[in-house]
Amino acid sequence: MVGHSYGGLFTINTLIYHPHLFENYIAIDPSLDCDNQKVLKSAKEILKKENFDGKSLFVTLSAGSLHMQNEEITLDNVMQDTSEYTLFTRSITEFSEFASHQKQNGINFSWKTYENDIHGTVPLPSMRDGLIFLFEWYQLKSFWKYNNPETPVGELVKLVREREKTLTKHFAYPCAPLEEELLNMTAYMALQSDQPEKAYAFFNLAVEYYPQSANAYDSMADYFETQNDFENALKNVEKAYELSRKDYHKNRIDEFKKKLK
């Protein structure tokens, strides 16, 4: 859930009163000064005692206009000011500093200040940074290891399995760890680099995670063909044809049968 200004206030209000509706929240320059800081005061009490395990909140604050009415006011001293003009900034800062210290409630929280942005320009960088923070778990870990020929096959398979667990945990349903295209691409790269063990592992993972994909079986057939194992190549292309009913796979079946004669 993403909200800006009063929408940001609504976002935080939703988190504290209806946390079951969303798992991830971005509150951009939220109007926590509204109604004598009503939501701010309630949020501090609720964040202190309720459990928000599995929830993530990213809050942003624009500070580009802070000095426009009084050049002496900065982010360093704004909390010492008591004027109505700084109440907006002070409210967001108070909430964010408080939320940062509530480790006991399990919330995944972060906030960021944009010194060169004003209220109207802060949404764009906020959404980018917020999405990166909220979905950090989705990023592919140790990506360089997949392209490194020195990485052991067992370590790569372990990375894939760990990613499967991470995605399944966050999405709350069984989830393939990598797109079929990425599994196949890694397999073909290994094959071209004379690493048949690694190629087989990733072709096999593609078949495992995408059992209804004719392409996965056809790619596995390619692997066996390079190993001159035409019997297993035939079995896989027959499975591909069973799923696709395409002439391409039918023709490959004929080709492998000829090679087995």
Image (cartoon, rainbow, N blue to C red):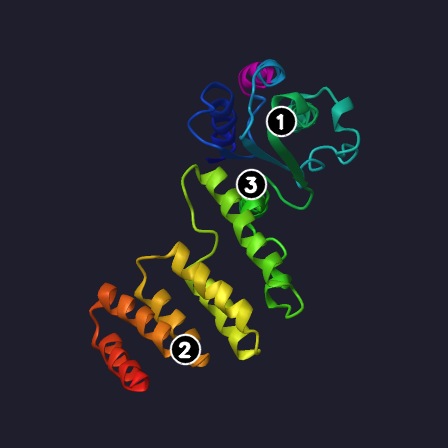
Q: Amino acid at mark 1?
A: Phe
Disc 2 or disc 3, which is closer to the eye? Answer: 2
- Where residue 258 sits in the image (x, y, percent)? 27, 86
**Residue drawn at x 50%, y 25% as measured from the top left:** 15
> Residue most toward the front?
261
Q: Earlier in the sequence, mark 3 or mark 1?
A: 1
Q: Secondary structure at mark 3?
A: helix
Identify which residue is drawn at 51% across, 21% down. 16
Of 238 and 119, the residue lying toward us:
238
* Quadrant in which residue 230 is drawn: bottom left
Residue 209's tag is none
Q: Which residues are magenta?
A: 34-43
* Element marked by disc 2: loop
Along the line of sight, the residue nearer the viewer: 142 or 58 = 142
The disc label shown at residue 134, or none: 3
| Dot 2 amino acid type | Asp
Which element carries disc 1, helix, strand or loop?
helix
Q: What residue is pinned by disc 2? A: 229
Relative to 207, 149 lies left or right = right
